[in-house]
Amino acid sequence: AQSVTQPDIHITVSEGASLELRCNYSYGATPYLFWYVQSPGQGLQLLLKYFSGDTLVQGIKGFEAEFKRSQSSFNLRKPSVHWSDAAEYFCAVYNTNAGKSTFGDGTTLTVKP
Amino acid sequence: DGGITQSPKYLFRKEGQNVTLSCEQNLNHDAMYWYRQDPGQGLRLIYYSQIVNDFQKGDIAEGYSVSREKKESFPLTVTSAQKNPTAFYLCASSIPTGGIGYTFGSGTRLTVV
């Protein structure tokens, strides 16, 4: 069965600093990987996705992620964090055979002024 | 614009009552999903449907029921058999292959008193 681990429950960064959120997955085949963002009391919004091709993918709001098969990782990065990036971030892997996604437990990002 | 509408946003019910949460999408997506979100536990899959008139149990289906009579609609009923129904419920939709990621509704917060 597939699984997703987000090792960091909570991360605090200063505004303007760089950000990296970690995601490790377990999946037997080539994974479909996603990052989502959730503001308090809202639904999730898709930031970016990977399922083939270039291992460095660009998303919305200036985010990017790199797929590393050897490390089973799909870490999310942003060069310079803005206060509006404070939210909860979820990594997910989609199981193409089962037709459903498994989500990590999320990482809460706090941005210090 | 296309999207997913969940209603109501807030719902209060007395213990022992069944309650139905609405989820409607106009994205022409075949697949629809219900997730439950509790603090610190990420998203847990309740039920999902890949096509009209068919649905599958997710990881925590006990105490819930669904129907999929129309492509656009996937209502979730929280029954009195659900031991701890107070939670934030999220509906999502996608194409069957999942490659585009999920589109989420804005959620329904159910409180049982």
Image: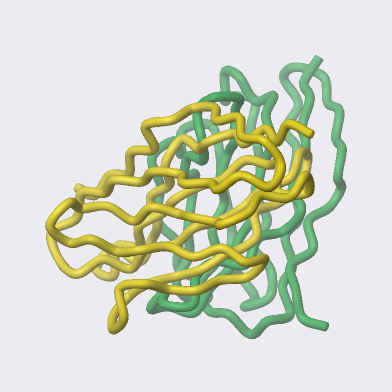
Q: Residue at x 68, y 47 (%)?
A: A16
Number of dots carrying numbers? 0
Q: Residue at x 48, y 39 (%)?
A: B44
On-image quarter of the C terminus of chain A: top right
In this rendering, position of residue B90 left or right of residue B8: left
Using the image as rendered, state which of residue B101 and residue B23 is in the foreground: B101
- The x and y percentages for residue A33 are 37, 63
In this rendering, position of residue B101 left or right of residue B77: left
Q: Which chain is green?
A: B
Q: Which chain is yellow?
A: A
- Colouring used for the render: by chain
In this rendering, position of residue B77 left or right of residue B3: left
Using the image as rendered, state which of residue B16 and residue B110 is in the foreground: B110
Using the image as rendered, state which of residue A25 and residue A73 is in the foreground: A73
- The x and y percentages for residue B42 are 51, 35
Up-down relation of residue B81 to residue A85 (above or below):
above
Q: Residue at x 61, y 44 (%)?
A: A17
Q: Residue furthest front?
A: A16
In this rendering, position of residue B57 left or right of residue B30: left
- The x and y percentages for residue B72 are 68, 75
Up-down relation of residue B55 to residue A111 (above or below):
below
Using the image as rendered, state which of residue A1 and residue A50 is in the foreground: A50
- The x and y percentages for residue A50 are 37, 72
Up-down relation of residue B100 to residue A86 (above or below):
below
Q: Residue at x 23, y 61 (%)?
A: A68
Location of residue B78 (image quadrant) = top right
